[in-house]
Image: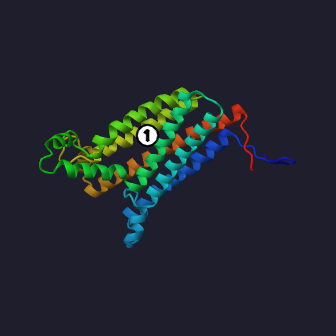
Amino acid sequence: MNTINEQGVTIRITEKKVVFIMLVALIGIEIFLVILDAVVNYGKFTDIGALRRMSNLAREDGLATWFASTQTLLAGLTAMVIYMISKQMGKKTLETLGWLVTALFFIFMAVDDAAQIHERVGTAFKTIAEREGNDALSVILNISPSYPWQLIFVPIFGGIGLYMAYFLWMQAQGSDTKRLIVIALLLMGTAVVLDFFEGLDKRHPWNIYTYIREYYELRSYTVSHFAKVLEEFLEMLSITTFWVIFTKHLMRLIKGEGVKFYAV
């Protein structure tokens, strides 16, 4: 209930209500994007290529990419607000540093999502490694049977991810938040594994998509497309969960410390 007094407007919101609205709205949008892809793009609801590309969840230049990068950026900015408030409150250095690292990581992921940084860096690495005289890089390139970018970014992202998981677990207040952390990590981990399989050669013995296609006698495009759609959906769902975790922490931080905001 909102109240108006001489000091201004007081808006009262509960943590459960905010979390519920976020989950319903964000997951609803993500499900809508999947349906939009299935109907307009894959189902060929229209023969206009531009509209089908815009709704194609597997592409990096459609509505889904805009939503995913925006959501990731907002999650990062939420973590940045937590960092600034924690620093202002005089919290321990390790706590404020953890939120700063988390915020910067999510902000970078948002930029990466929109600009395809890891894919392009991976392609550049492969191009350089395949040039004559770069035998050492060529050997490194052949270590991974999947996308080249994974050789560079998976160890970095994996290390930061482990640090973040530990940090958020230590920051978590209540078993509900810890469950959300586990869910978010499982969703993101599954998306990364699916991306690894996607990058394998069709004849590679580890390529589960080849087995699925042959067993169910499906078209190659059908399997590869919906595998990518599933991966992107799980990734968006993971970011949604992380954003909810950050929002819960921010609300508890504000409530617990009696933080007030003033318009000046």
Label 1 packing within 10 angstroms: few (<14), some (14-19), many (20+): many
Please say which color scheme the image uses: rainbow
Side of 188 where 178 appears, left or right = right
**How far from the left and from the top, in percent, is residue 64?**
45, 57
Question: Horizontally, is 173 left or right of 127 in the view?
Answer: right
Residue plotted at (46% across, 50% down): 110
Residue found at x 49% / y 55%: 67
Type of amino acid under label 1: Leu
Find the residue positioned furthest to the left: 132
Give the x, y percent position of residue 107: 48, 46
Name the residue: 26% across, 43% down.
208
- Disc 1, SS: helix
Residue that numbered label 1 is attached to: 187
Q: Horizontally, is 259 left or right of 94 in the view?
A: right
Q: Residue furthest bottom?
A: 48
How many numbered marks, from 0 up? 1
Q: Position of residue 163 (x, y in %)?
A: 44, 31
Q: Please, is residue 173 above or below residue 128 in the view?
A: above
The answer to whether residue 238 is visible is no
Residue 45, x across and y down, in percent: 41, 68
Residues 151 and 222: in front is: 151
Residue 13 visible in the picture: yes
Q: Could you say which quadrant of the image residue 162 lies in?
A: top left
Q: Eyeballing the image, is 224 above or below 85? A: below
The correct choice, above or below, for 257 with respect to 116 in the image is above
